Image (cartoon, rainbow, N blue to C red):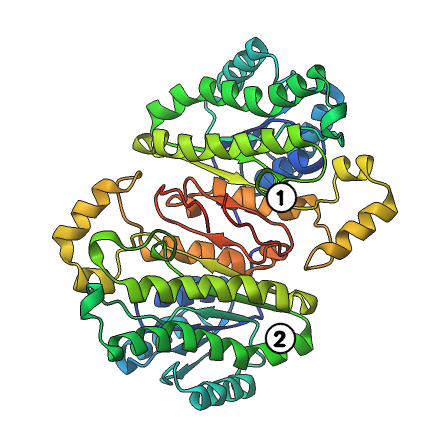
Amino acid sequence: MAEASNSLRGKVAWITGSGRGMGRAHALLMAERGADLVVHDVLKDEAAATVEAVRKLGRRCIVSHADVRDVGAVQGLVATAQKELGPIDILVNNAGVGQHRPFEDISEADFDLMFGVHVKGTFFCTQAAVPTMKERRSGKIVNISSIWAMTGAGINKASHYCAAKTAILGLTKAWAKELAPWNIMVNAVSPGGVLTEMPIKTQGWDMIREKEKRVPLGRWARPEEVSYAVAFLASGEADFISGQQISPNGGETIVGI
Amino acid sequence: MGNLIGKVALITGSGDGMGRAHAVLMASRGADIVVNDIRRDAAEETARMVKALGRKAHVVACDVADTAAVRALAAEGIGTMGKVDILVNNAGFGQRAQLPEIVEKDFDRMMAVHVKGSFFLTQALIPAMKERRYGKIINISSIWGMTGAPVASHYCAAKAALLGFTKAWAKELAPWNIHVNAVAPGGVRSGGPIKLDNPEILRAKEEKVPLKRYCEPVEISYAVAYLASPEADFVTGQVISPNGGDTIVGF
């Protein structure tokens, strides 16, 4: 039987923040579809659990605990990955932090953390991955933004998070154009509500149930429902898609991005 | 990949080009297909391709601009296949005409095929989808529905109207778990542009795409098939634009 058009067999995928939540779901779906994985998370136990699950699926895997804000460590990760698994074909910039805070209460440390992990992390992870993608004239970068990048956060009050996720859309659009001559596709996935540990911890179930009622489809997503969009964009099926955004958000319309 | 096994897809304008590519890809993933086209011969050929993949196909030849015919199409599709899970509003045509040249007949036909056809076919299929609390509607818009173009303003407006339906229906039909999305292709090497542009013009246009090429019809089908699958059950009211890297802002 011919290889399925969405197969990731023979590809090396690097997923930042893949120790838990959506990042782990992306890793497992992509491993199921044949990719070898760079599992990357500052949380060691969580990363180890993802590694074990990926290996159970029969895929090759390395692990890194580098902080995405540490440019040197990230470059080291890429060198190791290349040696152990081969050049990186797919980068999913997924690592993130959530924080609910009114504007006046956001300290400089909060601000720096938010922009450090989301924006600086995405920027320098991508810069480290791009040279071999250019050489091979092939690459897929999927940046994880958020519906809040487009809508703002309303009652949750997280303007630093919203702005960091919007910056990721800026990078997506700019890189799509800048890297197109090397056949490198850059897209974003902007999830709406997803049932992962992060919102359960920061918002609590009562607030989540209340918010689910306001989603047109009446529910939040399972993490893998976001992974399907990521894996689609990472596959050969999306070779003509670049500079775009898919927002699995249960029916909110996005205007003016 | 068999993620459409057991599903029935009705695809308008599936006698050639992108519509046929959608039919063949969705059949290869397990869907049975109601093939609609204004040209019966072309529709029959697509049906043969679907059957060669081991799936069922049923042809209903009609003009989607004819509301009575479109209602009959919906009834015959459901009657023959037992249900329609997926509707792809794909039937359409291009016309490279500038504002002063677009006569009333051109305008009416453009709106009738793209807008009125999609509206009344969807209206006819919705009651059964609501009953089953499941459905996927994919409207084929165009990058020109978002960016405009220096020609074909009636086409641009008709394709923009499909985005309006997409957003409104996504909200209106969400309570019944019916998902409505749009695919807005950029340049595709299909019948339309090949007929409308000569090879040099086509080549020059490809040079202006960031990825420096137009795509094959199946590259649009991949986006349609993703949205039609259970993998996109949390995706509604959205637009995917396989366009080779052009950024869309403010749609």
What residue appears at the point 83 percent right and 46 percent down from the top-left corner? Answer: B201
| Position above or below: B93 against A58 | above
Pinpoint residue A196: horizontal percent, then vertical percent.
Answer: 26, 61
Q: In this rendering, would A45 be left or right of A60?
A: left
Residue designated by label 1: B185
Q: Is residue B39 above or below residue A185?
A: above
Residue B240, which numbered label?
A: none
Q: Is residue A92 visible?
A: yes
Residue B147 coordinates in the image, percent (x, y) = 60, 43
| SS state under label 1 | loop
Dividing the picture into quadrants, the one containing residue B76 is top right
Image height of B27 relative to A29, above or below? above
| Residue B184, quarter of the rendered image | top right
Give the amino acid type for the residue marked by disc 1 in the picture. Pro
Q: Residues within 10 Å of mark 1 (few under 14, many from 20)?
A: many
The location of residue A21, given as percent across then percent down, is 30, 65
Label 2 is placed on what type of residue? Answer: Met
Give the residue pinned by disc 2: A133
Q: Residue at x 56, y 24 (%)?
A: B115
Distance (Cα) linking label 1 and label 2: 26 Å
Left or right, residue A203 beside residue B39? left
Q: Are marks 1 and 2 in contact (CB under 8 Å)?
A: no
The x and y percentages for residue A61 are 45, 78
Please state the chain letter of the residue tagged with numbered disc 1 in the rendered image.
B
